[in-house]
Amino acid sequence: MLSIKYRSKIGNQILIPFVLPIAILVTWQVTTSINLIDESLLPTPVAVISKCITLIQSGELQRNMSISLYRATSGLLLGGTLGFVFGSINGVAQRFFNSSIQMIRNIPHLALIPLVIIWLGIRESAKISLVAVGVFFPIYINTFHGIRSIDKNLIEMGSSYGLSKKQMLMKIIIPGALPSILMGFRYALGVMWTTLIVSETISSSSGIGYMETNAQQFLDMPTIFLSILIYAFLGKVSDWIALSFETILLNWQKG
């Protein structure tokens, strides 16, 4: 009996998140099928799926998705690494150059697009640089805050036990700051996709953003909606990855 109730509970937890998306898709299909909304403004889900299949068969979708994923992950690794390193240095070294970084942080990173285009053109380095700048600050701020928020009693306890600086960093500082760092990582993933979308729609000849902009010129609504849905899917996958990291790396908190 308990096993049946447990399985039912697990099943509900799996199914409940899909209720709203399915309801939206059904409503979307019905309203466009009965011409409540003009298909030239809102294509049916069937039309979007059909366009997706066509683009897969031609290889265009895979090519643009792989390019966008490359830009996103490269920018995340570059900006995230720098954000973690600078946040750690400032957190440990008593705000060595924190005020300078905070001043730069107040500049919207998307405002740098004209400057980046002038300096780097529309090459891959321009998109990767913009993504790196976008993800740098969330990870930097949360790393800095996480380290500065560690209980001083833990630091004193580590010193009293004779821990070296490396042991103090690995056993007390990093684990203590990890929840805040992972929160910054999760937020940075959202900024990553937002920055990539803008950079690919303004100055690009490939990628999902370019595919959407190119479709706009020809009023290809199914491709436009497909691009939007792909970004939504990639964002959801990124969020799931971040939650998985939190579950694995913060498992010790349950104890």
Image (cartoon, rainbow, N blue to C red):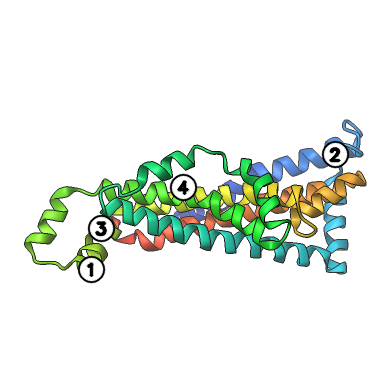
Spatial separation of the CA atoms under disc 2 and disc 3: 52 Å
Give x and y (percent) for residue 249: 37, 62
**Crowd around label 3: few <14 · some 14–19 · many ≥20 (10 Å):** many
Q: Compare marks 1 and 3 and give the one earlier in the sequence.
A: 1
Secondary structure of the residue carrying numbered label 2: loop
User: Where is residue 99 shown, x and y percent of the image?
Assistant: 37, 41
Please rate how many residues cluster around mark 2, counting C-alpha atoms within 10 Å: few if below 14, some from 14 to 19, many from 20. some
**Which residue is at a point 30% across and 47% down the rendered structure image?**
95
Which of the 4 quarters of the picture holds residue 72? bottom right
- The amino acid on which the numbered mark 4 sits, given as a three-letter code, is Pro
The residue at the point 48 percent across, 41 percent down is 105
Describe the element under mark 3 as helix, strand or loop. helix
Front: mark 1 or 3: 1
Which residue matches tag 4? 138
Instruction: Report if the CB atoms under discs 2 and 4 are less than 8 Å apart.
Output: no
Please report whichever mark, 2 or 4, sits nearer to the chain's N-terminal start. Answer: 2
Three-letter residue code for mark 2 = Leu
The label on residue 173 is: 3
Q: Are marks 3 and 4 in contact (CB under 8 Å)?
A: no
Distance, label 4 to label 1, CA atoms, is: 25 Å
- Helix, strand or loop at label 1? It is helix
Residue 77 location, x and y as percent?
52, 63
Q: CA distance from mark 1 to mark 3?
A: 10 Å
Direction left: furthest residue: 160
* Residue 11 shows in the view: no
Give the residue number, with chain letter if any, for mark 2.
42
Q: Mark 2 against mark 1, which lies toward the viewer?
A: 1
Q: Nearer the viewer, residue 101 or 81?
A: 101
